[in-house]
Image (tube, grey):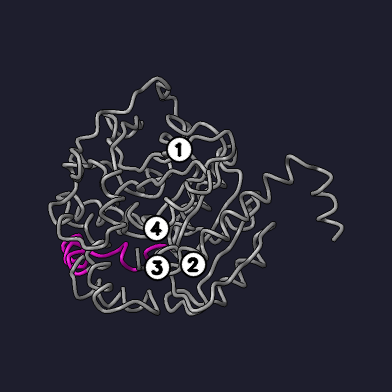
Amino acid sequence: MFFSVSICSSAALSLPLRCNAKISSPRVDVAADAFPSFLPREMHTIQDPSARKFAMRIQRLPVPVRFSENPIMSSCVKPMVQSKETPVVLLHGFDSSCLEWRYVLPLLEESGIETWAIDILGWGFSDLEKLPPCNVVSKRDHFYQFWKCYIRRPMTLVGPSLGSAVAIDFAVNYPEAVEKLVLIGASVYAEGTGKLATLPRSVAYAGVNLLKSFPLRLYATYLTFTNISFSASLDWTNVGRLHCLLPWWNDATVDFMTSGGYNVSPLIGKVKQKTLIIWGENDRIISNKFAVQLHCELPDATIRQIPHCGHLPHLERPDSTIKLIVEFVQREEAKQLNPYAAQVSRLN
């Protein structure tokens, strides 16, 4: 969630595997006022009411992929609102989970927007007991198969931090699946995982153990946000590291780190979709100069800054974030419905 990593551009996989569109959602093992059984038991210690309520909606759906013999039971939050308009799909940042969207997703649904939150392969709460590869190509392939199985129409894809790199990589490789992009505090200029990719595996495992440690995560929370209380910092840190407590997290994270990670800077100029860039005014993780650079390099982008806000506006300033996203989505849809209005807008 809090650490900047980059993107490796790879050729898209041509997948012969067909997804059965009739796959039904498996029964979610959730009793009344209980959490899904696959979540770590530490979920019960979380204080944030929004996180607790949101966690009850997390479920796993089967996603067939060519690099795994069996479908991957993939964690996500499905929409409560069904719409004929473009759905919004929320990714998360580096080493995080769909719990990042505990404040914004319900607000998007209140606005009448069909909204998904999806865990990127290797992070979040998917069942990875039989560990698949967790490199960039596998992450992209898994997300495409998820989209093809369950969403099946062009989407507005939202990516925060490293999730912006995931979104750009996906939009360039599968343009038919992405209608618009929203990039939040985008980490898109790092050159992969750098020297971490060359570490001996024993050293890499020591590094990921440090990565999930509470003191390091708490310090990352301090850097990420500008105006939250110490008690909230403690609770948000626990929310942010819940997925690290799953038994396969170490292996999946080492696999990603040693694979080279994301390096999408060569892909930025190839993005065809209209894009909204959102940045926190007081971002201490990714410099605002990269927001300006990204705005200049994207062919069709708008940039908006949220004042008094750090690296993750969707957590720190959800009301401001939701307003920008809804305006972006609905304005573009209104233009499509009324070409004359769009023409007048261009003239103005």
**Contact check, label 4 and label 2, Cβ < 8 Å:** no
Q: Residue at x 34, y 29 (%)?
A: 64
Which comes sooner in the sequence, label 1 or label 2? Answer: 1
Q: Nearer the viewer, mark 3 or mark 4?
A: 4
Which comes sooner in the sequence, label 1 or label 4? Answer: 4
Q: Residue at x 32, y 62 (%)?
A: 197
Q: Locate residue 278 relative to residue 17 in the image: left or right.
A: right
Residue 47 versus residue 256 in the image, above or below: below
Q: Locate residue 140 relative to residue 322 in the image: left or right.
A: left
Which comes sooner in the sequence, label 1 or label 3? Answer: 3
Residue 253 lies in the magenta-colored region: no
- The image's mark for residue 103 is 4
Local packing at callout 4 (Cα closer than 10 Å; few below 14, some 14-19, many 20+) is some
**Which of the 4 image quarters holds residue 268?**
bottom right
Rounded to the nearest whole Å, what is the CA distance between mark 1 and mark 2?
Answer: 23 Å
Pointer 2: what residue? 185
Q: Residue at x 35, y 78 (%)?
A: 223
Pointer 1: what residue? 144
Pointer 3: what residue? 4
